[in-house]
Amino acid sequence: MKACFADSNIVVYANDRNAGAKQTVAIELLTRLMRGQNGFVSVQVLQEYANTALTKLNQEPAVVLRQLRHLERLTVLAPSPKTVRRAVEIRGTYQVGFWDASIIAAAESADCDVIFSEDLNTGQYYAGVEVVNPFSPGFDLSLYVQ
């Protein structure tokens, strides 16, 4: 089974009632990662979700708190000085923004095989971690989770 990291946009779509089919895909993806115990997120992902949920999705704090507790069923990676330094290196190597580099560094630190993201280049490998866009036509979730 592959170790899979979920980027912030996956978590946001799962909680956005206006996201249509993307919400359905995101919910199924996160649910299966939780069940399979092969899903990872970082503290940064939780922070980005909480900020977006409170400001753009206008969710009540109680809803956001409940969702954050639910997301703790995934393995949550905390930043370390080493991952911050690695993000700086990744930023320079791949010419991505610092926050994207921080996502990549967190996934790399957990030996993840894949990052599910709509924001990074699907099919590209960053620091040995493949990026997959679960909203792409023909995406097959069963290749990654049970």
Image: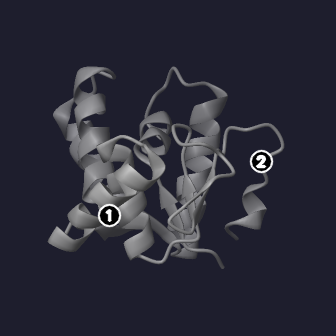
- Residue at 77%, 47% (x, y): give it: 139
Is residue 73 in view?
no
75 lies left or right of 2:
left
| Mark 2 Cα-neighbour bin, 10 Å: few <14, some 14–19, many ≥20 | few
Q: Are marks 1 and 2 in contact (CB under 8 Å)?
A: no
Whether residue 145 is visible here, answered yes or no, is yes
Residue underneath mark 2:
139
The residue that label 1 is drawn on is: 72
Left or right: 36 with respect to 64?
right
**Secondary structure found at label 1:** loop
Q: How is the image coloured?
A: one colour
State which quadrant residue 47 falls in: top left
Identify the amino acid type marked 2.
Phe
Count all numbered tags in the image, as a single digit.
2
Asked which quadrant contains residue 121, the reply is top right
The residues bearing labels 1 and 2 have C-alpha atoms spaced at a distance of 26 Å
Which label is found at residue 120? none
Between residues 42 and 83, which one lies in front from this camera angle? 83
Relative to 41, is 123 on the left or the right? right
The N terminus sits in image quarter: bottom right
Which of pointers 1 and 2 lies earlier in the amino acid sequence?
Answer: 1
Task: Identify whether 118 is placed above or below 131.
Answer: above
Query: In the image, which is nearer the foreground, mark 1 or mark 2?
Result: 2
Three-letter code for the amino acid on which mark 1 is drawn:
Glu
Q: Please say if 89 is above or below 98.
A: below
**Callout 2: helix, strand or loop?**
loop
- 111 lies above or below 129: below
Residue at image point 70% right, 71% down: 146
Label 1, residues with CA under 10 Å away: few <14, some 14-19, many ≥20: some
Rendered position, 146 above or below 70: below
Closer-to-camera residue (41/27): 41
